[in-house]
Amino acid sequence: MSIILMIIFGLTAILAAIGTVQTLKNREYLGFVFNLGTFVIFGAFTVATLITQGYPAPI
């Protein structure tokens, strides 16, 4: 179950990183702040899940 959660969090973090770059190019500062916050939070959740549960997750 935690591996699915890690995949979802990881994909969200990757999409937020892409959105951060795009909003910075378009000079949309509010979108940049929200995308950066999403990237940091979901990236941290991904790393924390990877550290606590391991990869692959134990059964």
Image: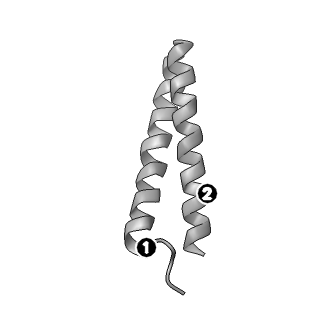
User: Residue visible at 45% across and 50% down?
Assistant: 43
Q: Amino acid at mark 2?
A: Ile
Q: Which mark is residue 54?
A: 1
User: Residue visible at 60% across and 75% down?
Assistant: 1
Q: x and y percent of residue 56 in the render?
A: 51, 74
The image quadrant that residue 40 belongs to is top left
User: Residue visible at 39% across and 63% down?
Assistant: 48
Q: Camera-side residue: 10 or 31?
A: 10
Q: Amino acid at mark 1?
A: Gly
From the viewer's perspective, is residue 2 above or below residue 22? Answer: below
**Residue lying farthest front?**
56
Q: Please tell me whether mark 1 sits on a helix, a strand or a loop.
A: loop
Tell whether 16 sits left or right of 46.
Answer: right
Q: Camera-side residue: 34 or 20?
A: 20
From the viewer's perspective, is residue 1 above or below residue 35? Answer: below
Q: Please tell me whether mark 2 sits on a helix, a strand or a loop.
A: helix
From the viewer's perspective, is residue 57 above or below residue 16? Answer: below
In the rendered structure, which disc, 1 or 2, sits on the residue that comes first in sequence? 2
Q: x and y percent of residue 26 in the render?
A: 57, 13
Q: Nearer the viewer, mark 1 or mark 2?
A: 1
Mark 1 vs mark 2, CA separation in Å: 16 Å
Q: Camera-side residue: 55 or 29?
A: 55
**Residue lying farthest bottom?**
59
Q: x and y percent of residue 6 in the render?
A: 54, 62
Q: Give the quarter of the figure containing the C terminus.
A: bottom right
Q: Residues within 10 Å of mark 1 (few under 14, many from 20)?
A: few
Per the image, the residue denoted by label 2 is 8
Marks 1 and 2: CB-CB under 8 Å? Answer: no
